[in-house]
Amino acid sequence: MGDETSTDSEGIESGSAVTGTAAKLLSAARGQRRMSQRELARLAGVPQSTVATIEAGRRQPSVAMLERLLRAAGFHLATELVNALRPSELLERQRRSVTEVLARYPVTRAWPTGPAARGEDRPDSDLDLVVALRPGAAAGDVAGLAGELSTVLGCPVAVTTGDPGGGENFFYTRTA
């Protein structure tokens, strides 16, 4: 099975992500469909000059306009939010919300471990969190904790129970 991409005259690969300006994106879409500016404009219901000024970089279209033009060329614009913050940063920024979540569980202390604790985490890292439980509580009592924390933080969270000992670097300590 070979790579299904090819490169056009502007260096844009078909079958791969096109990054950069709206001009490059629109030009690549039109080029892959072998459409003229006039044909694309007609299908999108806009003047040909609109396509020309966008492709020339003299106009930055709205997202709605770009989607309209790309749809007319037979594409859709796939956008997604990608986390750019490290889990340790998210934890600090959302400290209050995380503390509120932890307070709903039988957790007496919580602290990050792994890359986040060492300052080696990256935006695509998980947050590893160790929690100490109240006496008599079981691991099953915190079954939904990781999911709630993932929702609050916007990153994957792995929760384990226990006490790695030796550390005072707690993120959370129950006060009552």
Image: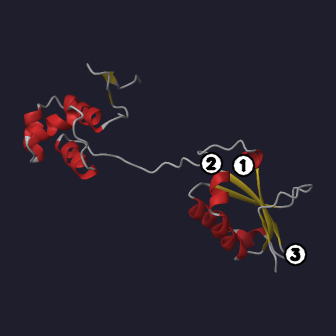
Chain-order first, disc 2 or disc 3: 2
* Residue toward you, 117 or 128: 117
- Would residue 29 be visible to someone looking at this image? yes
Amino acid identity at mark 1: Ala
Count of numbered labels shown in the rendering: 3
Q: Residue at x 84, y 61 (%)?
A: 162
Mark 1 surroundings within 10 Å by alpha-carbon count, few (fewer than 14), some (14 through 19), many (20 or more): many
Which quadrant is home to the C terminus?
bottom right
Amino acid identity at mark 3: Pro
Residue under pointer 3: 135
Residue under pointer 1: 116
Which picture quadrant has residue 53? top left
Chain-order first, disc 1 or disc 3: 1
* Residue toward you, 143 or 43: 43
Which picture quadrant has residue 149? bottom right
Q: Are marks 2 and 3 in contact (CB under 8 Å)?
A: no
Chain-order first, disc 2 or disc 1: 2
Q: Position of residue 94 (x, y in %)?
A: 63, 63
